[in-house]
Amino acid sequence: MPFQATPQWIGVPSFNIIDIDPIEVARAFQEYVYVGSRLTGVDLNDISIRVSKLPDNSESVTLSELLSLGMKLFDAIVWLTAGRPSSHKLVADPAMTPAEIPSMHEIARATFYCYFMLLVQARYPAGASNPEKPKIPNFLTTIMGMSDDQSKYVSTICSFEPSKFDPKWVHHIQFDGLGQESLSRFGLGVAGYRMFGPFKLYSPKPNMDQNLRPAFNFAKKVASSKASWNVHPLTRSPNVLTKRGNLNKNLGNLMLECFTLEDLKEMEKSKLIYKIPTKEANHLQYRQWTEEDDITGTAVIFKE
């Protein structure tokens, strides 16, 4: 059929439909997705900018000066990191009494309290409004004498929910200069290794399925290796999940198949493990585990 010109009466319809450019939209959304994907990140509106009096020069005020004026440590870090924003100028609060301002020693102890919890349990202590309170190690309450409620140490250095403050800062703390008592306690174990511990201390039961020997040997090797940031939950490499699956749940299943019930009860009683594991049917990667330690790497926590 020969081509025919479009009749003039048809016109050009307007559908009011806009087709997006996926590449340009991705560029526009990148920062939003980046920020929204993280559990950490502090809104400036969440920090307290109260101080007992305004500093002589807000443009050059230092962290230690802000602390002496009553600003909380984490709040001050956020404010300074934001570049002393003019949108959130410091506010003088004449009602703030010297008794409200913690000493530098109190701030240091509260900071160590949080640091210890992050390194050993991979979580901050709970603030007053958080009902999920982790169990505080005896080392802090008894040896270090930090027996107040954990919320007190949080409120000393932070006015917002501390989980918003990226905990990866613990990775960069130097151990040189730490008290010997603390170093000795860290040597007993850090977060991420508790479920590996039994494989270093206990022998498998005589009737263990020998197909699980490579998995048992892998767990024993990791437990016997130097603690690594690649395994610590705060800094764990994504490759660990890819290679081995969920470590704790797979290790729990492996324990049930490798150890006797009597051994498991003994582990629980001695607090080597929190409790006897329960079967996790969706975490069976351990059955294909090879015995080489391919997760520890060289990112050791305690360098010699």
Image (cartoon, rainbow, N blue to C red):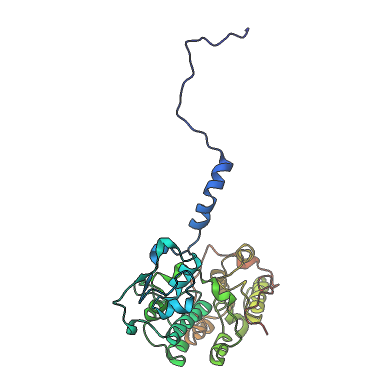
Where in the figure is residue 189, as x and y percent of width and height? Answer: 56, 83
Q: Can residue 68 be seen at all in this image of the molecule?
A: yes
On screen, residue 72 versus residue 284, left or right, reads left
Asked if residue 52 lies left or right of residue 184, the reply is left
Q: In front: 267, or 128? A: 128
Q: In this view, does 99 lie above or below 192?
A: below
Give the farthest residue toward the right.
Answer: 292
Q: Can residue 275 be seen in this view?
A: no
**Eyeballing the image, is 203 above or below 84?**
below
Q: Residue furthest left?
A: 95
- Please name whichever residue, 151 or 290, is drawn nearer the observer in this view of the structure: 151
| Of the pair 93 and 266, the residue shown nearer to us | 93
Which quarter of the rendering shows the N terminus?
Answer: top right
Residue located 45% across and 29% down the image: 16
Please report the residue visible at 60 percent of the width from the left and 81 percent of the height from the top.
174
Residue displayed at 31% across by 81% down? 97
Where is residue 90? Give x, y as percent: 39, 69
Residue at position x 53%, y 53% in the image: 31
Residue 146, position as x, y percentages in the image: 42, 88
On-image quarter of the C terminus: bottom right
Occupied quadrant, residue 197: bottom right
Tell me how many marks there are: 0
Q: Which of 5 and 206 is in front in this view?
A: 5
Where residue 161 sits: x, y (%)? 40, 69
